[in-house]
Image: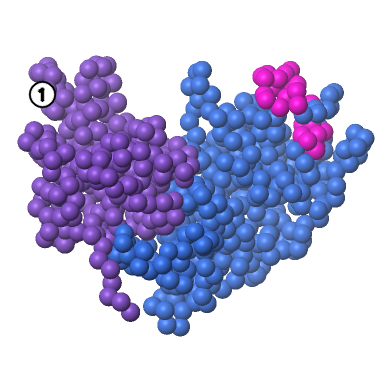
Chain colours: A purple, B blue
Amino acid sequence: MAGNFWQSSHHQQWILDKQDLVRDRQLDLAKLSEEEYQKIFNFFASIIQVLGEQLKLRQQVIATATVYFKRFYARNSLKCIDPLLLAPTCVFLASKVEEFGVISNSRLITTCQTVIKNKFSYAYGQQEFPYRTNHILECEFYLLENLDCCLIVYQPYRPLLLFVQDIGQDDQLLTYAWRIVNDSLRTDVSLLYPPYQIAIGALHIACVMLGKENLKPWFAELNVDMDKIQEIVRSIINLYEMWKSYDEKKEIQSLLGKMPKPCPAPQR
Amino acid sequence: MQGGSAPREPAPVLNTSSTILNMREKEKYIEDFDFPFCDESSKYEKVAKIGQGTFGEVFKARARNSNKKFVAMKKVLMDNEKEGFPITALREIKILQLLKHENVVNLIEICRTKATLHNKYRSTFYLVFDFCEHDLAGLLSNVNVKFSLGEIKKVMQQLLNGLYYIHSNKILHRDMKAANVLITKNGILKLADFGLARAFSVAKSGQANKYTNRVVTLWYRPPELLLGDRNYGPPVDMWGAGCIMAEMWTRSPIMQGPTEQQQLILISQLCGSCTPDVWPGVESLDLYNKMELPKGQKRKVKERLKPYVKDPYGCDLLDKLLQLDPAKRYDADTALNHDFFWTDPMPCDLANMLAQHTQSMFEYLAPPRRPGHLRHHHHPPGAQPKPAQPPQDSGYQDRVF
């Protein structure tokens, strides 16, 4: 499906304004600091990534699932739906939308159980993955509604390939930039900037990491808003800075404890 | 919002006991069921059922707000509980959000019923479309509707325009038939029902696509699908365009096979035998040796359609669209450049003709059409096609994904 990003719901409805995003998160940010909030999303992005890898999904599907996840909480508090339920739901929906097929219910649940037990026991201890197929199928409805049925997500991977082709095929550069794009899913950039800008930002960081001075003229000739690129670069670098001083294994349990949770309505 | 609203929706299908959660249980993980992003379907008032689409019923409805605009609402049918929200519906939604063209039906929005205890907290989703007054099958089944040659040209030109647009967006319709061609009272044609549509890519060397070949209503299904091709492309829709074009004169589907085997025989009787001579590579299709393929049949497309079509350019274009070999079949662009559209009488507007008919015509509401006109006279023994009773195979249960 070719499609045109500029006419898409991604461009028209889902490139959010930073101020709006901060405002819509107020409910959660009353209980969590901005950094704690980012750490929680970093954690759930890891869950989606590992789930996707275990299910042998393409990175494109994993990326779409992660963006669905972020879009949902861009408009809702963490307490609306337990993110541990929404994460596999996003994977389930993204796999269908990206034509990767329907993941069988039992395989999805089993994978969730194994992944939580084997890879994330530092967060959940002995607690098992508590949800079943019926929860996921129901949650899918809420997800669809909140996405306003905007299903197509454009990812930075394709523009990245085109840019690297234009530069002159450089496998090392592509590998680095590709990983940086993967990392960018743990920041807010996919909610704030069009994918081609994220691709340029990732290329920029990769060039700095690899000391590729000779590409300066290539960047200079791009007809893009360099301020936006700098904002993207800063978001991703901030993530790397955070990682340096952050031990998820030690901190995540208490963060999940602080996370706003659904509180039962008063009895009727 | 509930006051004076539409008749209660029946509860969605997904309500087996396993999915019913009690209130307390649910609140452990979901706090608020009321999400404001899709509008509620109660903003429309259903007027009549007008059809049965690939994945649900279709209703005519009217907006409750001031403009009272008519819309068509297509209910998303949840028939496979395990699949969750149906992949066909997801495809239709994402494809329709992508396609915006005068000759493609316009998706206005997606609506839902409110999730309440009453429907087990599962909304019913509706796709909401601009309303079109007629479908082509309905128009053709009404003997009082007469198309002039110029009007037929206009219908085909718009149909090919729509196909050109969707194919250049790398989308296959995969369910071309007269009932899926809508026509507004102003004579604008809209391709509809993208429930079977999908994106396609041009197969790279060495790695063929593997699409399901269980698509397209049997009477409009091209020979490559009947022979098991899974690496097909836009020509599957062009075959359907050819069938529909012939139907503009015959007024009923030209090849009404009751089974896949029979359909292949009917095709061979009209278009000649499927041989590697006329269709290089046909011998490597999966079912080439499994299906009975009539030998020695001569191609009689022009000869048999001439009595109906009369216009030699029309006959020629039909001949180009009903090519057995998908590689030789005209694409939408080439078809639009055919002399048929550029000779007198030129394509002419349908609005005046349609203005004489004030009642909506849909296949769903029309009496069954007469059995096929293009019956062949000497059927092979044991291959007598059954009369008009609609074949089971053309129904929607045929779709396997």
Residue placed at 73% from the left, 24% from the top? B288
Residue A107 visible at all? yes
The residue carrying pointer 1 sits among few (fewer than 14), some (14 to 19) or many (20 or more) residues within 10 Å by Cα, namely: few
Quarter of the image that includes the N terminus of chain B: bottom left
Q: Quadrant of the C terminus of chain B?
A: top right
Q: Is residue B103 left or right of residue B298?
A: left
Question: Between B171 and B117, which is closer to the camera in this rendering?
Answer: B117
Q: Point out residue A210 in the picture as x, y percentages from the top left corner.
A: 13, 19
Residue B82 image offset from top left, x and y in percent:
51, 49
Q: Please give the name of the residue rendered at 71% of the width and 27% of the height, measured from the top-left corner.
A: B287
* Residue nearest the viewer, comparing B205 with B170: B205
> In the rendered structure, which segment of residues is drawn in magenta?
B261-290
Q: Nearer the viewer, residue B85 or B352?
A: B85
Give above or below for A118 relative to B372. above
Chain name for mark 1 = A
Side of B374 relative to B203 (left or right): right
Given residues B156 and A110, the one toward you in this image is: A110
Residue B104, visible in the rendered structure: no
Q: Position of residue A149 (x, y in %)?
A: 39, 54
Residue found at the far front of this picture: A126
Magenta-drawn stretch contains B288? yes
| SS at circle 1 | helix
Disc 1 marks which residue? A208
